[in-house]
Image (cartoon, rainbow, N blue to C red):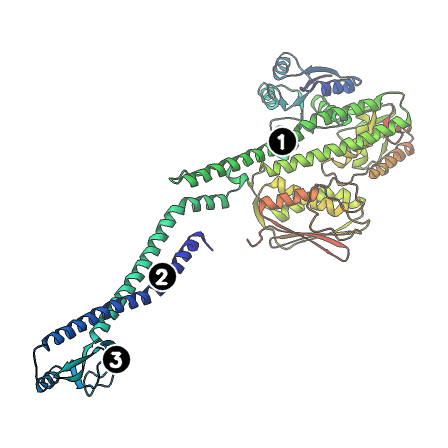
């Protein structure tokens, strides 16, 4: 899978590349508008991460050009602007997702997988991890053909872990992911324990192995 | 007291005093002058009589003369006395009721060895009338002069001070965020031109400071987002390193929590700056009850977590010309607070009646300090969650939309009431 990262903050780009490279992604980088435009014209990507404010141009212009040229790349806008009109503008121009800085790399990773799945397989995909299979279109989870009843939150959580398999995901990122992040009503994350506890119980009860490991109270790791 | 009236008052007092003093003074002076003239004529008359008497004249002649001339009276006297003049009040005619003033000169005459007392009288009635007329005319003249002066003075002052009043009214209605840099008109008066120029430079200096500050907050918040994002991503990379000790994990966890807090704080500050920079224009018609109804499901998760009962009452559905994003933030912040500061198994009442939205919740904290709750970064008691900007944002949104907000506390319930259309 080829990903183009268009972002002018070198350090941030370096971190994104480092995190995403451990997946099966091949990351290319464009630090400015012109480089980005050349790369988009010359190559095809599976997903483009697009910063709106570039030193020599507006990222949204690139997005418009992509759509005009009927390119099929999935686009995730990464922006410091978090107001609803900004998001609506980006999404109306045809972006697949909108992520506000600062973001969790685990969240970015989950969104990239979702976009690629949607683009490449039309969402008709089953993720298989050892004995576990996740049917994305039907939103069902099986362990060796045995169906597990999960709530929507638990399903989201499992998918989030699966997208970031073999990585430590922090409690903060889990909390933001499953609460939708926008509202920030609670400042402590006690509420995620219940979801994780239930998920682990349901997986083990169905005969699966408990792959969700707690990492010193800092976060969790889904080991496959 | 207004400036114009102030100068006028001094003029009025002075003119009045002048009138009060000059009219009697004038009266006495003119009266003396007149008396002096009368006296002089009496003396002349007496001198002429004395001269004429040098020729011999018989006593009967004298008596006839005295009889004929009513103004001259002769009577025998037994001694000589010095001439003297005085005023007496007498009847002009026998059957007059009132007494009239007369000026009389009395003198001693010696005719044929006999002393006579000669009295020459002149009626002062005409003089008195004259005097009265003169004083009246003088008084009227003074009054006319006074009124004229007041009128002219008033008009001239008004004209002279008009640039001042213009400047004053301009400054009174001047607001940085509405009018931008100020321009004051030039005048013909050096002092006012100087005043306007000084005011202009002072205000424009302040305006620039205001602009700089406005921009600074927004720019600073924007600039902070990048390092925050970098830091966040580095922490996540750090988490992936192995081996990781429990101590290191604890530190990373704490760093991440604080970074998240910092990011949230920054976002709120940026929002406040944007509200103050009026980047949210009231462009839409928003039905409030619909907005609240649409918003509540997104809180369902939190209501369940705290086992909260939400009681909604929508009596009306007022529609406002406002910015929808801001109204959403307003409602979201108030509901978040109602959840956050609620007790397990508590209640939230949402009530829309007329132009009022009331959000009430059970809670265990004390009454909030009414005067300080809207201050930035104000936190009451032991509250350590939250960043203390939620209500500041709510208040700013209310302010720029001219909503009124009130806080009530009774029986352990906290209530925020917003009136979207407060009476002026």
Q: Which comes before the other along the chain, label 1 or label 3?
A: 3
In the rendered image, which residue does mark 1 sit on?
A: B216
Q: Position of residue A71 (x, y in %)?
A: 62, 18
Q: CA distance from mark 1 to mark 2?
A: 65 Å
First along the sequence among labels 2 and 3: 2
Q: Secondary structure at mark 2?
A: helix
Which circle, 1 or 3, is nearer the viewer? 3
Q: Nearer the viewer, mark 1 or mark 2?
A: 2
Q: CA distance from mark 1 to mark 3?
A: 97 Å
Res. A139 visible in picture: no
Which SS class for mark 1? helix
Give the foreground label among 2 and 3.
3
State left or right for residue B114 relative to residue B246: left
Q: Position of residue B95 (x, y in %)?
A: 20, 88
Residue B97 in the figure: left or right of residue B316:
left
Mark 3 belongs to chain: B
**Residue tagged by mark 2?**
B18
Above-or-below relation of B421 to B237:
below
Image quadrant of residue A41? top right
- Among the 4 quarters of the image, the one containing residue B186: top left
CB within 8 Å, label 2 to label 3: no
Q: Residue furthest top?
A: A42
Using the image, determine if residue B120 lies above or below residue B202.
below
Tell me if mark 2 has few (under 14), some (14-19) or many (20+) residues whose alpha carbon lies within 10 angstroms of its own: few
Residue that badge 3 annotates: B88
- Relative vertical location of residue B346 with respect to residue A18 in this rendering, above or below: below
Viewer-nearest residue: B280 or B150? B150
Residue A200 found in image quarter: top right
Instruction: Tell me the element at label 3.
Output: strand
Residues marked 1 and 2 touching at CB (< 8 Å): no
Relative image position of residue B231 (x, y in whole percent): 76, 25
Where in the figure is residue B396, as x and y percent of width and height? Answer: 63, 43
């Amino acid at each position: 899978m080829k990903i183009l990262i268009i972002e002018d903050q070198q350090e941030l780009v370096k971190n994104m590349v480092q995190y995403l490279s451990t997946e099966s992604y091949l990351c290319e980088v464009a630090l400015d508008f012109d480089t980005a435009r050349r790369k988009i014209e010359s190559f095809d990507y599976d997903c483009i991460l697009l910063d709106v404010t570039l030193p020599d141009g507006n990222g949204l212009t690139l997005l418009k050009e992509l759509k005009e040229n009927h390119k099929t790349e999935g686009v995730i806008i990464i922006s410091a602007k978090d107001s609803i009109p900004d998001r609506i503008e980006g999404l109306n121009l045809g972006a697949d997702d909108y992520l506000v800085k600062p973001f969790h790399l685990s969240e970015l990773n989950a969104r990239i997988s979702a976009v690629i799945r949607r683009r490449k397989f039309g969402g008709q995909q089953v993720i298989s991890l050892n004995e576990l299979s996740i049917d994305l279109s039907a939103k069902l989870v099986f362990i060796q053909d045995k169906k597990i009843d999960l709530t929507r939150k638990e399903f989201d959580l499992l998918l989030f872990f699966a997208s970031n398999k073999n990585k430590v995901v922090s409690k903060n990122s889990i909390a933001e992911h499953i609460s939708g992040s926008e509202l920030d009503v609670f400042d402590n994350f006690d509420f995620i324990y219940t979801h994780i506890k239930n998920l682990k119980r349901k997986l083990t009860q169905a005969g699966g192995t408990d792959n969700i490991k707690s990492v010193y109270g800092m976060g969790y790791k889904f080991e496959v | 007291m207004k400036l114009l009236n102030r100068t006028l008052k001094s003029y009025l007092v002075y003119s009045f005093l002048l009138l009060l003093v000059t009219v009697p003074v004038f009266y006495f002076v003119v009266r003396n002058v007149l008396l002096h003239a009368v006296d002089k004529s009496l003396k002349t008359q007496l001198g002429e009589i004395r001269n004429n008497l040098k020729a011999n004249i018989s006593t009967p002649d004298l008596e006839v003369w005295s009889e004929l001339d009513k103004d001259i009276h002769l009577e025998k006297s037994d001694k000589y006395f010095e001439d003297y003049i005085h005023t007496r009040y007498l009847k002009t005619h026998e059957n007059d009721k009132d007494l009239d003033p007369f000026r009389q000169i009395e003198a001693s005459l010696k005719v044929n060895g006999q002393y006579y007392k000669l009295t020459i009288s002149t009626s002062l009635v005409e003089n008195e009338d004259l005097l009265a007329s003169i004083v009246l005319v003088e008084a009227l003249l003074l009054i006319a002069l006074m009124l004229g002066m007041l009128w002219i003075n008033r008009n001239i002052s008004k004209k002279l001070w008009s640039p001042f009043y213009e400047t004053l009214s301009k400054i009174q209605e001047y607001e940085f965020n509405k009018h931008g840099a100020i321009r004051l008109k030039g005048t013909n008066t050096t002092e006012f031109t100087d005043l306007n120029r000084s005011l202009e430079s002072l205000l424009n200096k302040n305006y620039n400071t205001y602009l700089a500050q406005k921009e600074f907050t927004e720019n600073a918040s924007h600039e902070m987002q990048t390092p925050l994002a970098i830091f966040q991503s580095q922490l996540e990379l750090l988490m992936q390193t192995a081996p990781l000790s429990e101590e290191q994990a604890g530190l990373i966890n704490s760093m991440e929590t604080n970074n998240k807090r910092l990011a949230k704080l920054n976002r709120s500050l940026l929002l406040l700056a944007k509200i103050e920079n009026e980047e949210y224009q009231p462009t839409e018609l928003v039905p409030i009850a619909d907005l609240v109804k649409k918003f509540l499901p997104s809180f369902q998760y939190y209501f369940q977590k705290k086992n909260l009962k939400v009681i909604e009452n929508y009596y009306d559905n007022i529609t406002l010309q406002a910015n929808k994003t801001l109204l959403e933030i307003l409602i979201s912040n108030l509901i978040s607070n109602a959840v956050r500061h609620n007790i397990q198994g508590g209640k939230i009442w949402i009530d829309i009646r007329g132009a009022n939205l009331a959000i009430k919740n059970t809670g265990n904290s004390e009454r909030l300090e009414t005067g300080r709750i809207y201050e930035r970064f104000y936190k009451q008691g032991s509250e350590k969650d939250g960043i203390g900007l939620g209500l500041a944002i709510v208040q700013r949104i209310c302010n720029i939309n001219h909503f009124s907000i009130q806080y009530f506390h009774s029986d352990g319930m906290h209530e925020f009431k917003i009136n979207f259309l407060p009476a002026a």
